[in-house]
Amino acid sequence: MAGTVAIVGGGASGALAAIHLARQVNPPNLVVIEPREELGLGIAYATRSPAHLLNVRAGNMSAFSDVPDHFLDWLRREHDPSADAGTFAPRMVFGRYLQTLVARSGAVHCRRGAVAVKVEGEAASVVLADGGSIPASRVVLALGHFPPVDLPRISADALSGGLYHRDPWRDFPLPSDRDSPVVLIGTGLTAVDMLLRLREKGHRGPVTMVSRHGLLSLGHAPCAPGAGPAVPDSTAPSAGAYLAAFRSAVRNGAAWRAAVDSLRGTSNPLWARLPTGEKARFRRHLFHYWSVARHRMAPCIAEQVEREQRAGLLAIRRGHVQDLAMSGGVGHLTIVTSGVTESLAASCVINCTGPVTDYRKVQSPLLRALFLDGHAVAGDLGVTLATDAEGALEGASGACSRVLYAIGPMRAGTLFETTAIPEIRQQARDLAMHLAGMHS
């Protein structure tokens, strides 16, 4: 295919794009535009905590779907000779694996930020923050996740006093009083990561996780595979019908974990069949239940969380967060549960609600330019970007680009499953083959 492919973003998605493009018969010149020093890490794999584990078994974490044991073999050779397919490896170790592979891709690392993409016919120029530009025949957007949406009302004192932390992945000082209470807004895997970080740094005080539904992510456990997808292709395209089919599978003997896992390869087609109104209904009523069952904790982490709960050190609360104020050096988070208002005291409040998905609200010069220039539109329900089956961006005209593509979490506006390595590696492979085919 030759030419130059510019990949904007150097986390896991960008790294996998480069790795698979480099495997093509006539690979293009590759430029990865990423301000951070290291490629392949992004948010998830930049952690330096050995307590932060993958939530997918090593046997399903290969960068190559056609070489399923690639990561496992590397893991045994480079980190843990006793590892097996069921091992939940440290995330930072998987980051090293991706770094090794992207280094072999021959990609040039441009340590600049991208602020716009100019498209002329079937060529593009990525405009950099320093005023420079990089010409490319194709551009792959791999920006990953963005920090959570801020709380609705935060007092100036809470902001200036270092009490509140919007981005859980930024380095910030933990409370000096190791016995003081901490509140984590969110009950998903990010909140669990922050709990582990607190304990690793020696914090002993009580931790409260609060979310609208109060649902904690569940743990992995061995289970026999199901006989087939819990929601057959023939199921009527509605949220209610999908739920009924899933419940029927469990009633008929499928373990719930196996039923969830059976949908791994079919959830995107099932999602695509739903009318927009049914997608909204699913998001509103079922998505939170699906998330805690689908995105599960490694068994040893689930056990630690259970120990924290039994010891009274971790509380899970259901409630709507109203505001955060500071008084006497202590934070007071107001939550409303079933019409009852209460205040939670905290020396530290960390926003773990998950990445923002409405890109129109993200403070990103590049995204803003893509929308303003008509190169991108929001996806279904206002989520991320609209893309076609190959990941090409849909523009304001309704036509899909032959130059601009997205990969990974940026495709959540069209795809239901698009954030885990097994899905992203397949996207990377498919996109690399698609781009190669355009130039064959």
Image: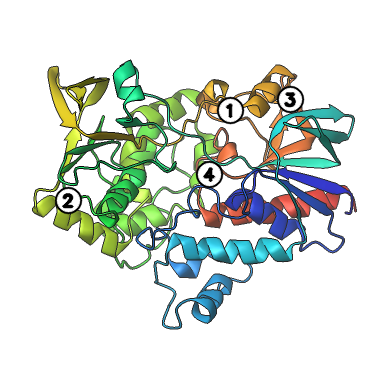
Q: Quadrant of residue 15?
A: bottom right
Secondary structure of the residue carrying numbered label 2: loop
Distance from disc 3 to disc 1, alpha carbons, whole Å, reads 13 Å
**Of the residues under marks 1 and 2, which one precedes in the sequence?**
2
- Does residue 246 appear in this view? no
User: Which image quarter holds the N terminus?
Assistant: bottom right
**Of the residues under marks 4 and 3, which one precedes in the sequence?**
4
> Label 4 belongs to which residue?
268
Distance from disc 2 to disc 3, alpha carbons, whole Å, reads 50 Å
Residue visible at 38% across and 58% down in the picture: 52
Distance from disc 2 to disc 4, alpha carbons, whole Å, reads 42 Å
Amino acid beneath label 4 = Asn
Q: Which mark is residue 204?
A: 2
Residue visible at 37% across and 52% down in the picture: 260
Amino acid beneath label 3 = His
Left or right, 340 with respect to 78, comes to left
Distance from disc 1 to disc 2, alpha carbons, whole Å, reads 43 Å
> Label 3 belongs to which residue?
375
Residue 167 position within the rendered picture, expressed as x and y whole percent measured from the top left: 42, 36
Q: Residues within 10 Å of mark 2 (few under 14, many from 20)?
A: some
Report the front residue among 124 and 92: 92
Residue visible at 77% across and 44% down in the picture: 6
> Label 1 belongs to which residue?
379
